[in-house]
């Protein structure tokens, strides 16, 4: 089963909007999340680890 990275990122954005943290496993998804969150003017704290990035709503 193939899942679009964009679709995956949009689901994560919905979680962030609801006040939950979201984890991006790849740099590509993390970059897309950052771009879309900036467009929506949603502020998050990004915690980058060796396994991926956590996006925590402020």
Image (spheres, rainbow, N blue to C red):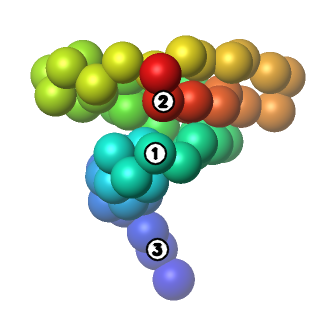
Q: Residue at x 71, y 31 (%)?
A: 52
Q: Characterize the local packing of mark 1: few (<14), some (14-19) or many (20 or more) Cα atoms within 10 angstroms.
A: few
Q: Counting other residues with Cα less than 10 Å from the Cα at mark 2, is it few (<14), some (14-19), or many (20 or more)?
A: some
Whether residues under marks 2 and 3 lie with C-beta atoms below 8 angstroms apart, the answer is no
Residue under numbered circle 1: 19
In the rendered image, the vertical position of residue 45 relative to residue 13, given as above or below: above
Residue 33 or residue 18, whichever sits in front:
18
Q: Is residue 51 left or right of residue 8?
A: right
Sequence-earlier tag: 1 or 2 = 1
In this figure, which residue is indicated by the disc labeled 3? 2
Residue drawn where x is 16% and y is 28% of the image: 40
Q: Nearer the viewer, residue 53 or 15?
A: 15
Q: Considering only vertical position in the picture, is 19 above or below 28?
A: below
- CB atoms of marks 1 and 2 within 8 Å: yes
SS at mark 3 in the image: loop
Q: How far apart are the alpha carbons under marks 1 and 2?
A: 6 Å
Determine whether, in the image, residue 55 is placed left or right of residue 2. Answer: right
Answer with mark 2 or mark 3, whichever residue precedes in sequence: 3
Q: Secondary structure at mark 1?
A: loop
Q: Is residue 28 visible?
A: no
From the image, state whether disc 2 or disc 3 is nearer to you.
2
Q: Residue furthest left?
A: 39
Q: Residue at x 57, y 30 (%)?
A: 56
């Amino acid at each position: 089963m193939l899942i679009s990275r964009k679709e995956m990122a949009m689901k994560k954005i919905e979680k962030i909007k609801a006040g939950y943290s979201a984890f991006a496993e790849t740099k590509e998804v993390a970059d897309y999340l950052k771009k879309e969150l900036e467009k929506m003017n949603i502020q998050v704290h990004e915690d980058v680890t060796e396994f991926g990035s956590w996006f925590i709503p402020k």
